[in-house]
Amino acid sequence: MQTSNNHIKMESFSENMTSDNDNGNAEAELMFQLLDFARLHGRKITEEQMEQYDEKAQTALKKLIAREYFRKVKKKGPEFYSITSKGLNLFKDKRKRGTVLEDLKEQILEKLRDTIGELGMKPWEVMFHIIHVIGNRQPIPTEGVIQYFEGQFPDLKGTSKPNIYRNLQRLRMKGYIEYAKILFKDQSPYILSEKGKEIFKMTKADAAQKLRTVEEWDTALKKILQRIDEEKKEDEEALFYTLDYSIPQLNGQQLMWVLYTRGNVYELKGALDKAEEAYLRMEGISEEVKDHKGRAYALKGLGNVAFKQGKNAVAEQYYKRCQRIAHHLQDNLLLSDLLNNLGSCSYLDDDVDGALELFEKALELTGDDKSRKASTLYNEGLCYARKEDLEKAKELWFESLSLYKTLQEKTEIKRVQHNLREIDRKEKRDYLEDNYRKVKQMGTTEEIKKAYIALVRFTMDDLKGGG
């Protein structure tokens, strides 16, 4: 291909963008033109050729790169963009030459329109790019990482500033990146840790498999929690009617604790508005009768409601107000509950180290209460699982499981056993994947075949078991 004379034919593109209301169709048309040009001109488009066109063409090319239809090639001489096998496969028997007939073109456009609609970056893909931009430019501040995404992937879902901050925090928490020790800097830049350098050297497929652990783990936990909620469903209408209309005449202090029980039941059954109403009424009565303990438990209940509504910041404020009263009352069990709850808030905010510290303090205050101890040990195990210290997570969950068996808590037993099975599956999968990678490099054909079959069988069995 003659670099300076070949031009991508996009004469109709500007007209399409102004006259066609469906921007998705126009963008798919432009993507097709880019792919078709590369197909017919040595499988590439040069930087010089792309500079002749506007930002819309540049954006379309970046989206094609994001979905691996193109890749950027850096060799001696001018940089260029090469169409990949995935891109060529769109053209079927017209991979290298010949005019694309209308039927095939429409099939390609439909595929590209689907690509535009689903275009977004998964969390592990974001982490992969973060590791590579840090590895190539280290040290680099947060703002530098954000600028990279804004430049390379301006329109991709999943690459917003909050998502980038969240994934930077995940990578730092999991030990893949760390702060460079540079003094007198307003913003500490990032560098790769030894663990991060290993990811940096991996192929994209291997790195993605490694980095998606957090997402898979969180999904597995959500599934089991959803199953537990479904198991607890009962006929609620009769129960709620009884709670609402069958309270006898009581004095203030008696009514306060009846309201607390009512709030607990509503909370358990998911009627959070009714639970909040009961706890607010309880708090009002506790102030009237000057019962500090009653007020503390009302605040704890309001915190629980806010937490279950996804209002972590509000929940933390309620828990901290309750904590001050509990310190004054020297109620260690209540303090243990609050530290556990505050730890849960930190965990969901991705501050796993902070959550772990709070759970450890909560454990010190549980005393002989087996239920609280089991729950706290379980929460500590979650933190270590997120930090990928699976041996420590297993140790804590086995201890938690033993206590739940003593208490005959069937639902909690199922939850812990599920997590332990998840760890066993992950460890086996990691072993089989590592073994396959090693034998591919140094093993015989028979060893490679054997390792591959073992990995495929495990994967199929895992899928049959529902993951």
Image (tube, grey):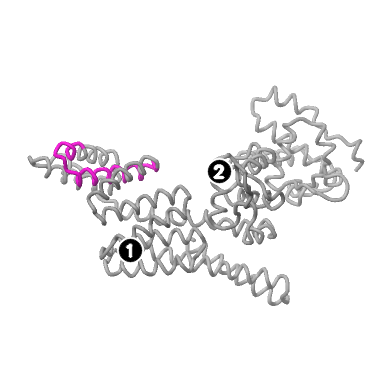
Q: Is 303 contained in the magenta span?
A: yes
Residue 418 horizontal/vertical position (percent): 41, 64
Name the secondary structure under disc 1.
Answer: helix
Magenta part, dominant SS: helix
Q: Residue at x 74, y 42 (%)?
A: 104
Residue 60 horizontal/vertical position (percent): 71, 37
Q: Which residue is mark 2?
A: 163
Q: Is 140 contained in the magenta span?
A: no
Give the quadrant of residue 400. bottom left
Q: Nearer the viewer, residue 440 or 165?
A: 165
Label at residue 374: 1
Residue 406 vs residue 98: left or right? Answer: left
- Taking the view exactly as shown, the residue that stands out farthest to the top is 19
Could you tell me if the residues under marks 2 and 1 are in contact, i.e. CB atoms within 8 Å?
Answer: no
- Which residue type does callout 2 highlight? Asn
Label at residue 460: none
Q: Residue at x 35, y 51 (%)?
A: 341
User: Where's the N terminus, which quadrant?
Assistant: top right
Residue 304 vs residue 79: left or right? Answer: left
Answer above or below: position of 12 versus 181: above
- Which residue type does callout 1 highlight? Ala
Q: Nearer the viewer, residue 103 or 194?
A: 194
Q: CA distance from mark 2 to mark 1?
A: 33 Å
Name the secondary structure under disc 2.
Answer: helix
Q: Which residues are magenta?
A: 284-312
